[in-house]
Amino acid sequence: MKNPYAPALMDDRGIPVVPPGGSSAGSAVAVAAGLCAASIGIETSGSLLYPASQNGLVTVKPTVGLVSRAGIAPIAHSQDTAGPMTRTVRDAAMLLNVLAAKDPLDPATERQRRSVTTPMAAG
C-alpha cells in the first residue's frame, strides 16, 4: 500500500519511503485519497494515530467504553477501541458523536451516560 501523498517515493527495493501507517492504514489511505469522506479504524497502540499522522488526517482515540467494541478482534480488551478518521476536526467530532452509544454487545459501554438527544445533530 502506498501513501497517497507520496505514491512514487520508493526505495530501490520498491518499499514506500513514506509508509501509509499501521493496521488502519487502508482506512486512512481511503480518506486521504478522497475515496470516502470518513472511515473507522481500530486503535490499540498507534493503529489510528500513526496512519492518521502519515496521511494528514484527523483522528480521535476514544476512551474504552465510549464506542462499542462489538465485532472487533481485540489485541487487548483494555485498550482496543474504534475511532474516526477524517480530513477535518469537525467531521471527526460528528462521526465520533454518532459512534458513541451504549451497546448491549459490549459491557464496557453500559456505564455511558449520554443523553438521547445529540447536540451536533441540530448543527
Image (cartoon, rainbow, N blue to C red):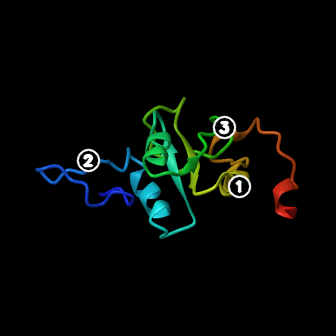
Residue 17, numbered circle: 2
Q: Is residue 32 left or right of residue 108?
A: left
Q: Which comes sooner in the sequence, label 2 or label 1?
A: 2
CA gap between label 1 and label 3 equals 22 Å
Going by the numbered disc 3, the residue's amino acid type is: Gly
Give coordinates of residue 51: x percent, y percent.
44, 46
Earlier residue among tags 1 and 3: 3
Marks 3/2: CA–CA distance: 36 Å
Q: Residue at x 16, y 54 (%)?
A: 14
- The amino acid marked with disc number 2 is Val
* Mark 1 vs mark 3: in front: 1
| Res 111 quadrant in image | top right
Would you name the residue on which mark 3 appears? Answer: 65
Residue shown at 50% from the left, 40% from the top: 49
The quarter of the rendered structure image containing the N terminus is: bottom left
The residue closer to the viewer here, 47 or 53, is 53
In screen coordinates, is 33 left or right of 1?
A: right
Q: Nearer the viewer, mark 2 or mark 1?
A: 2
If the image is split into quadrants, where does the C terminus sit? Answer: bottom right
Return the mark for residue 63: none
Taking the spot 87% from the left edge, 48% from the top edge, the residue there is: 115
Disc with the residue nearer the chain's start (3 vs 2): 2
Going by the picture, which residue comes out furthest to the left? 12
Q: CA distance from mark 2 to mark 1?
A: 31 Å
Name the residue beneath numbered marker 1: 90
Residue 81 image point, x, y percent: 56, 41
Q: Secondary structure at mark 3?
A: loop
Task: Say which residue appears at 73% left-offset and 49% top-offset.
Answer: 101
24 shown above or below 122: above
